Amino acid sequence: MTLQAARLERSERPNQSSSEVDKAAGGGSIRQDVLENISRSLFWMLAFSLLAILYLARDFLVPITGSFILALTFSPLVRALSRLGIPAALSAVLIVASLLMATLSLIYLLAFPVSDWFNRVPEIGAALKEKASILLAPLQVVMEAQREMDEVTTAVASDVQAVTIQGPGLFETAASNMFSMATTLAITLVLLTFLLGSGDLFYSKLVHRFESLEDKKQALGTARNVERVISRYLLTITTINVCLGVAIGLAMHAWGMPTPYVWGAMATLLNFMPYIGAVIGLGVVVAVSAVTFETLPVVVGVAATYFAFTTIEGQFVTPLTVGRKLELNAVSVFIAVGFWAWLWGFVGALIAVPILVIVKTVCENIDSTAHIANFLSNEQRKTHAA
């Protein structure tokens, strides 16, 4: 009896050990699932925290981002001037002074006509409403019923004391916006002066951050490539947009539009926002021409001219000038412009594409992120795993 019990105990030991292994494996998979859930939660917490920081600190981050983009744009010029014997600090002062003079000249040229058009917005709205009354004629019955319902509601609620909170007036809002814009411009230009005047200081610090010689070469090559690409892109796009503005300004003058240089400057500025800027500019031109001219063919001609110039620029001039390598996916551009406009407003929409170009260029120089650059690009390229 004792021998049989011993044999039975030995036969049960493998089963017991296998069950213990299964329990340990099950416990390991559970721990793996818990760790994956924690990592996903931490990732989304970090993403939302980053969005909150970008939004809440926009007054601080906007001038810093703008100054770094401008520094990447003008660094090759500073380096070229230094080879001619001009110190980097002097080149930085000259570049920033030129930018300041150009900005102040543009503000002086456009301030009075733009403010006059803003003051005429109610007049333009009334004129558009009057001219659109023919199209709204079938809706008059519905609008009259809605007006009668509002009168009844107002009569019933006449005994209820209304509490209104008066916000800041137009003058206070305009003054606040002007002060904010002036502060942002001042911070951007001052920081840009220091960045350009420092020369290759930041590149040296970037290289010393890495230990191996190969990593140092890759980091320096990536930084130089980003600088070269963003400089070429922004200078080319700026030249194209200025030429587009001049062409549209001359065309608006030929049609007899008032203050044609305003619409040319508007086209130049809005064209830094691909797709969205052209739509906004077309809407403004249509509204102004509709209240300026009496005949419909002239209004259609003005709108068609603006649309034709922006279409030729977007579909032919820019792709041929910039090159296929720097072209971006239309979907990614649209999402980037909308995202940065949501975060940082109009300035965010202006710098959305340069930020996207920087991200694409950096990803192209790193093997592990080459697929991101391929997604952002407008051409299909095969990526090879390292």
Image (cartoon, rainbow, N blue to C red):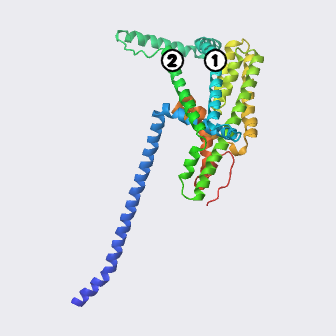
| Disc 1 and disc 2 in contact, CB within 8 angstroms | no
The numbered dot on residue 175 is 2
SS type, badge 1: helix
Front residue (pair 101, 61): 101
> Around disc 2, counting alpha carbons within 10 Å, would you say few (fewer than 14), some (14 to 19), or many (20 or more)?
few
Residues under labels 1 and 2: Cα distance?
A: 17 Å
What's the residue at 71%, 34% (across, down)?
Answer: 314
User: Could you tell me residue 355's position as x and y percent?
Assistant: 59, 39
Relative to 5, 250 lies left or right: right
User: Could you tell me residue 165's position as x and y percent?
Assistant: 40, 16
Asked if 294 appears above or below 106 in the picture, the reply is above
- Return the residue at label 1: 108
Q: In which quarter of the image is the N terminus?
A: bottom left
Q: Which amino acid does label 2 sit on?
A: Ala
Relative to 7, 313 lies left or right: right
SS type, badge 2: helix
Q: Which residue lies furthest to the front in this view?
A: 85
What's the residue at 72%, 29% (across, down)?
Answer: 310
Number of marks in the image?
2
What's the residue at 24%, 90% (across, down)?
Answer: 3
Asked if 193 appears above or below 292 in the picture, the reply is below
User: Could you tell me residue 321's position as x and y percent?
Assistant: 75, 38
Q: Quadrant of the C terminus?
A: bottom right
Q: Nearer the viewer, mark 1 or mark 2?
A: 1
Front residue (pair 151, 237): 237
